[in-house]
Amino acid sequence: MIASFGMLVALLLAAPQSQDPLFGWLVGKWCTEARPPSDRTTCEEWRPMVDGVMRGTTLTRRGGKVISNETMEVRRDGTGWVFHAEPSGQPPADFRAGPDDVAELAVSFENAGHDYPQRIRYWRDGDKLMAEIAMADGSRPILWEYHRAAE
């Protein structure tokens, strides 16, 4: 019995720990398939939450050359979850998720005062990660379909 308890403790200590399991489904490297004729791809990489902050990056390449990049964070503040984006060549912006905007495998963030996008959504569709940006009313959507990539 003691040996079994010791093995259980060792397994629990070795398991990856997350301070907030809400966004564990987002962790990893995700890439779109190359789109001819430019062979453009977009990859997002999200790291596990550490000290209440989950960090991510986005790189878009055309023909192997980086054409845009962005750093991102998801963090909790006093009123809920915040998605902080810092796209290359643009000022940073914050988008908020209310209590009803966070689900088991989906999240939606909004900032109606931002020019574009005003809404950022992520959700899982089976083994795919889906992402969409749009206006707050859902108009002008742009959709990405990501597949898990090798780390």
Image: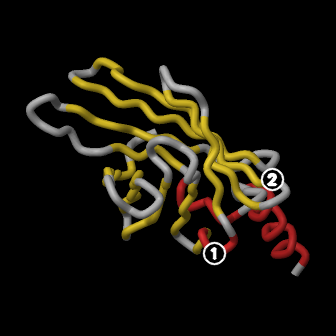
Seen at 20% across and 38% down, the residue is 34
Q: Which mark is residue 100?
A: 1
Q: Position of residue 45 (x, y in %)?
A: 50, 41
Apparent side of residue 142 relative to residue 124 in the rendered image (left or right): left
Q: How many marks?
A: 2
33 on left or right of 81: left
Task: Residue 62 in the image: state x and y as whole percent.
Answer: 24, 25
Type of amino acid at the residue the image marks with label 2: Asp
Q: Residue at x 45, y 41 (%)?
A: 44
Using the rendered view, name the quadrant where residue 145 is placed. bottom left
Q: Where is residue 43 shown, x and y percent of the image?
A: 39, 38
Q: Is 149 situated left or right of 94 in this image?
A: left
Q: Position of residue 33 (x, y in %)?
A: 23, 44
- 102 and 151: which one is in front? 102
Question: Which quadrant of the figure contains the N terminus?
Answer: bottom right
Distance of label 1 from label 2 (alpha carbons): 16 Å
**Could you tell which of marks 1 and 2 lies nearer the N-terminus?**
2
Q: Looking at the image, which residue is at 82% across and 46% down?
A: 51
The amino acid beneath tag 1 is Asp
Q: Residue furthest right?
A: 2
| Relative vertical location of residue 44 with respect to residue 90 in this rendering, above or below | below
Q: Residue furthest left?
A: 37
At mark 1, the secondary structure is: helix
* Vertical arrangement, residue 64 with respect to residue 14, above or below: above
In the rendered image, the residue lying farthest to the bottom is: 1
Residue at image mark 2 = 77
Left or right: where 9 falls relative to 25: right
**Dot 2: what SS?**
strand
Residue at coordinates 17% horizontally, 31% vertically from top-left? Answer: 39
Q: Residues within 10 Å of mark 1 (few under 14, many from 20)?
A: few
